[in-house]
Structures are given as structure tokens and as C-alpha cells.
Amino acid sequence: MQFVADLYKDWVFAYRITVSRYPALPLHFIGTTLFVALVAGLSTLVPYLLRQATNALSMDAAHRAAGSAVLLAGAYGLAWTAAHAFEWLKLMLSAAVLARCGAAFHHVIFARLIRVDYTRLSEQDPGKLVSGIARSRDAFSAIARPRTRSPDLCPRPSARANAGRDHASSCVAAVGRSRIPRRKRRRASVPLRR
């Protein structure tokens, strides 16, 4: 139970730091959370509309309403398009909020670093100091960046095709086989015979 209490204290401490530099965080966080809930609701509506459209199209002509199948198919198409568009908007909104939180943390880190006495700072190993700051920056910005990958360029490795290779090497191999045009080698110009 102590672990959960420590996590809560750390969360409150981080929240106070962030709100001190980013006062609109509560409003933006609530707005983003509501938008994520809307996207989740819209995403769950897509399969339901597909099922209803399929059921309406598979009924006999005598038992179905004249335009219900077309309306349901149109609603499915609009819901599917909106769900995919809103998915990108969701990623942009959450990345914007997380980037501002990261900027607030970095401002506090560097403001604190500037206030440290030079003698105390010069006693520290500069490599460790820079690496600690870089790790904290990279760790927080890794949360803010969405983890998307192109299915054409980076397929998941299969056990048979990529035996003995890790995922990174299979991505490199996939990029090598991709549709990226390679430069052709120039041949020495040979005069044409007539």
C-alpha cells in the first residue's frame, strides 16, 4: 500500500509543478478526456451500424423499409470516416497537452539548475548531469509521441520469415524491400552505331 501512496504523492507533486507553469491544464485535460470519450463512443458505433446495415440489406424486399438500408449504409460510411478523422484529432490534442506538460517540467528543471551555486554545480560530473536531463526529456516526450507505424514499411516479424532477427532488423529489411525507388547506376555512355 505504501507504493500506491508514494505514486499518489509523486503525481500530486508533478501536477502542482505542471499547473504552476501551465494553468489551463485542468480545463485542457478535461476537454481532451471528453473528446477521447466521444471518439471511443463513435468507434463503438461503427460496428453496430455495419451490423444494422448488413441486416437491413439481407432482409427480403417485402419485410424491409424502402430506404432504411441505404440510410444505414450511409450512416456507417459517415461514422467510419468521422471515427478515423477523430482518431487523428485525438492524437493531436493529447500530444499538445502532453507537450505543454513536458515544457512546464523542462522549464522548472532548467530554472532550478540556473539557481544552483556554480561551485556546487562544478563539483558534479557534467556528463551525468547532461545525461540525466536528456533522459528525463526523452522519457516525457516518449509519452507525448504517439506510437504509430506504417504497416507497409514496418510489418511485425513472423517467426518463419524473420527467424533469428529482432523487430528492428526486420523493419530495416522491410524498408529495403519497400517501394522506394533506388537510383540506377549510370553506365558509361557508349556511342550508338548507325
Image (cartoon, rainbow, N blue to C red):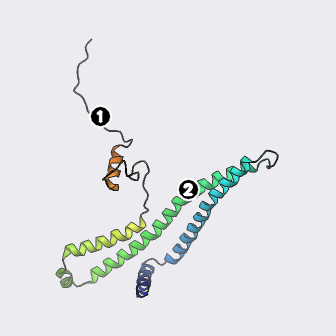
Q: Which is nearer the N-term, disc 2 or disc 1?
A: 2
Indicate the quadrant containing the N terminus: top left, top right, bottom left or bottom right: bottom left
* Residue at screen point 48% across, 78% down: 23
Q: Element under label 1? A: loop
- Circles 2, 1 touching at the beta carbon (< 8 Å): no
Tell me the residue that label 2 is attached to: 84
Q: Which residue is mark 1?
A: 184
**Helix, strand or loop for disc 2:** helix
Where residue 5 sits: x, y (%)? 43, 87
Residue at 77 percent across and 48 percent down: it is 67
Relative depth, front residue between 50 and 159: 159
Task: Identify the residue at horizontal 58%, vertical 70% (top origin).
Answer: 34
- Residue nearer the viewer, 138 or 20: 138
Rendered-image quadrant of the C terminus: top left
Q: Nearer the viewer, residue 124 or 122?
A: 124
Q: CA distance from mark 2 to mark 1?
A: 39 Å
Where does the image place residue 180, in percent across and percent down from the top left?
Answer: 37, 42
Q: In this rendering, would 59 be left or right of 81? A: right
Q: Is residue 24 visible?
A: no
Q: Amino acid at mark 1?
A: Lys
Please name the amino acid that badge 2 sits on: His
**Direction right: furthest residue:** 62
Whether residue 148 sits left or right of residue 55 in the image: it is: left
Looking at the image, which is closer to me, 131 or 167? Answer: 167
Percent across and percent down for residue 17 are 41, 81
Residue 145 location, quadrant: bottom left
Whether residue 109 is visible to the viewer of this picture, yes or no, is yes
Q: Residue at x 70, y 54 (%)?
A: 52
Q: Is residue 151 above or below residue 15?
A: above
Q: Give the percent coordinates (x, y) of residue 173.
A: 33, 47
Q: Which mark is residue 126?
A: none
